[in-house]
Image (spheres, rainbow, N blue to C red):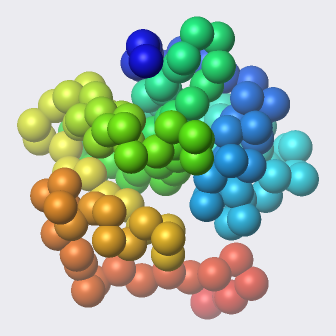
Amino acid sequence: MSVEYVVNRPITRQQFTELLSHTSLGERRPLDDSDCLDSMLANANLLVTAWQGETLIGLARSLTDFSFACYLSDLAVHEDFQRLGIGRELIRRTQQTLGQKTKLILLAAPAAAEYYGPLGFEKSERCWVLERSSEI
């Protein structure tokens, strides 16, 4: 199987939605909200994608300052291509693009909670989340 990895190739909302619908992230992303999905793509400033031919099979979508911190918001690999090292390679290429000064931060999906430790990520007890429905 030949996989091509590309940094910052634009993808369509339809490609994004199709990929997410074949991952565990699909149930936690607003797949029926076109405006939100368009904004998610437009405002991410680092996108590493995995392709088999013209088919998007994986992505790492991040927001970063390229200096200190990078939030890896979505790591998604199509269910038919999982356990082949694609997720690891997407993270590696994200990290490579960022350089050595930038810390990579993510919130693990429940189904992937055990995935990140063996890759070298350290679990943090200092993360806090303010839900959209909550106000300060």
* On-image quarter of the N terminus: top left
Seen in the image, is 114 located left or right of residue 28?
left
Residue 42: image x %, image y %?
66, 32
Q: Residue at x 74, y 84 (%)?
A: 133
Res. 121 in view = yes
Res. 64 in view = no
Seen in the image, is 121 located left or right of residue 21?
left
Q: Residue at x 42, y 83 (%)?
A: 128
> Which of 47 and 65 lies nearest the eye of the viewer?
47
> Which of 125 and 59 lies nearest the eye of the viewer?
59
Seen in the image, is 118 located left or right of residue 39?
left
Q: Compared with residue 64, is residue 119 higher up or lower down, i.e. above or below?
A: below
Q: Residue at x 50, y 81 (%)?
A: 129
Quadrant of the rendered image containing residue 67: top left
Residue 20: image x %, image y %?
68, 47
Name the residue at the top extreme: 53
Residue 22: image x %, image y %?
68, 47
Residue 23: image x %, image y %?
62, 52
Seen in the image, is 24 located left or right of residue 103?
right
Q: Compared with residue 97, is residue 58 higher up or lower down, i.e. above or below?
A: below
Count all numbered tags in the image, as a single digit: 0
Q: Compared with residue 119, is residue 91 higher up or lower down, i.e. above or below?
A: above
Q: Residue at x 70, y 57 (%)?
A: 26
* On-image quarter of the C terminus: bottom right
> Which of 25 and 40 lies nearest the eye of the viewer?
25
